[in-house]
Image (tube, helix red, strand yellow):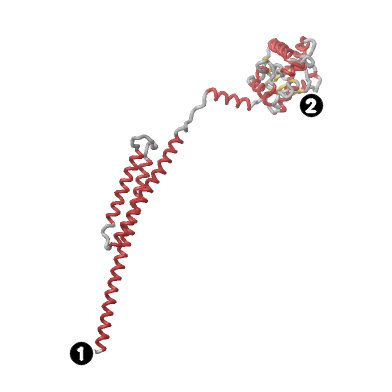
Amino acid sequence: MKFNKIPACRVISLLIILFIGVFCLTSCAFSSNRTYAEEGNNITEKSVSLTQREESATVAQTTTETTALPQPPTTSSSASPDTETLTHTEKKSSTSAKTSSASAAPSSSSQSSSSVSSSSASSRIPITDRVSNAISRLIPERSSETAEAVPVEVTAPSTSAAKTTSKTSSDEKLDFSKSAFLGNSRVLSIENYGFAKNVYGKVGLNVDTVFTENCEGSSVPVIDELKGKDFKNIYIMFGDNECGWGSMDVFVKHYKKVIDAVRERVPGATIYLISVLPISESTSAKNEYGYNQGAINNVNKLIKKLASDEGLTYIDAASAIVNSKGYLPDEASTDGCHLGKEYTRKWLAYVAKYE
């Protein structure tokens, strides 16, 4: 058999045509695969976007329904409103997941279909978890708000509490600006603690020396400090330094002179006689110069009778600070006689009732 010779140019031409055909087939296949891949990616993106929108709508609806719950969740066996909401939400999540899978079904290639299916399957789990987490976060907050709202109640103060507050306020705001105090060292503590300014007295002063002794820094007798003053009330306190006197009649007589002198110097003032304040039990037991609680009680009886005879008011300030045994409490004074600030305020609060 003889073979005809094929010209080289024809061989070359055939090879070129074959190469071109292979190149065209390869290009078409690559372009087709690229188109399929792009369509699969677009479908995947659309599916994910749809899933995210459904997730946002589901969480928003769950938030609205959960916020409207009237009561926090309970642990009872019966289904609570919150449990029903959770079941309803899970059903919606499952339905959304199915819809997402169905929308991703008509893909153009097996690769895009598997991608969409895996994306839908992975998106179903986070939706349920996120919704459950959202509900679990919202429910405790609701319970917390309910628990905090229960004890917030505004109750009106009781009558006794109101009276106590009123009394304390009146005690702390003592006003003796229109009054004056006259007496011995007991009245000096009133000025020392800042409860009043118009205080005229001296340590050791009595119903006799009030006409001869001067106040500290003054050149006139204590009794004359009242001259030319326009006081509404004059509170007089004497008797401590007179307890040891041999004659109480002399004490009463001289006390009356003091009352007359005050009337003369401040004719328009109302005069009050204040009782002698008590002393501590230990101080009374010392009985220095006849100064004891028994003697004080006798002097107070005389002062009370004198006030009645002169048409004046007797103020039993001792009753405001005396203890159950009839003595000054130990905590009221450091020396058993002169009062600290707290007990000075107490007996002054009692006197303030006559202002």
Question: Which quarter of the figure is the N terminus placed in?
Answer: bottom left
Q: Name the residue at 27% across, 79% down.
A: 20
The kind of residue on which mark 1 rests is Asn
Q: Which residue is mark 2?
A: 216
Mark 2 residue element: loop
Q: Looking at the picture, tell me which residue is in the foreground, 222 or 155.
A: 155
Q: Is residue 36 left or right of residue 220?
A: left
The amino acid at mark 2 is: Glu
Which of marks 2 and 1 precedes in the sequence? 1
Residue 264 seen by the camera: no
- Helix, strand or loop status at disc 1: loop
Where's residue 335, x and y in %?
74, 23
Per the image, the residue denoted by label 1 is: 4
Left or right: residue 268 compared with residue 113: right
**Structural distance between the alpha carbons of marks 1 and 2:** 157 Å
Q: Could you tell whether 107 is left or right of 301 in the image?
A: left
